Image (cartoon, rainbow, N blue to C red):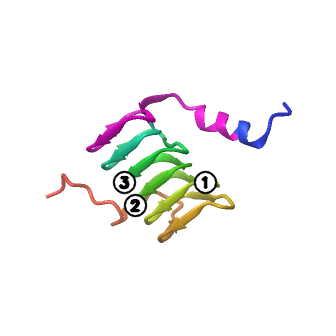
Amino acid sequence: MFGSKEAKKENAINSDVIETIIGLNSEVEGSVMSKGSVRVDGKLHGDVVIEGNLVVGDQGFLTGNVKAKNVVVAGELNGNVLAKEKIEINKAGRLNGDIVSKFIVIEDGAKFTGHCKMEKEEQKTPLLKENNKK
């Protein structure tokens, strides 16, 4: 009831069931695809295409393009991001790349370098190209 904003925010981030966690001492190279949500607390070098939410923890590092429902960046993300709903960059977060989403939240102190496009309806965008099209 009288918890801090940070505690409430952490609860909001963790409210979704996270099926895949890349731990603090882990480093993964390659693409990640999932129907659920993913949290990156270690290092991930590769594209992420998921139906759920992506959380890049405060010590997390991700290099690659992202397509997800919601994206929360508390660590560092280098790549283009397409979120169906919302992108949030927390005060310690760093996002380098172009972003497309319905809603965008950038806290004071966050670092964002790139272009931003807000779309109300899911539209085809050249930001993330699918590799399987011929």
- The crowding category of the residue bearing disc 2, from other C-alpha atoms within 10 Å (few below 14, some 14 to 19, many at least 20), is many
Classify the position of the C terminus by image quarter: bottom left
Q: Residue at x 47, y 39 (%)?
A: 41
Say what amino acid the circle numbered 1 marks: Ala
Type of the residue with mark 3 = Thr
Identified at 36% across, 64% down, the residue is: 127
Instruction: Determine the residue positioned at 44% across, 66% down.
Output: 98
**Distance between the alpha carbons at the discs numbered 2 and 3:** 9 Å
Mark 1 or 2, closer to the camera: 1
Which residue appears farthest toward the bottom when viewing the image?
A: 115
Could you tell me if the residues under marks 1 and 2 are in contact, i.e. CB atoms within 8 Å?
A: no
Which label belongs to residue 92?
Answer: 1
Q: Which residues are magenta?
A: 9-37
Q: Which residue is mark 3?
A: 63
Residue 4 in the image: x percent, y percent? 79, 39
Q: Position of residue 102 (x, y in %)?
A: 55, 58
Q: Which residue is mark 2?
A: 80
Disc 3 to disc 1, C-alpha distance: 17 Å
Judging from the image, what secondary structure is the residue with disc 2 in? loop
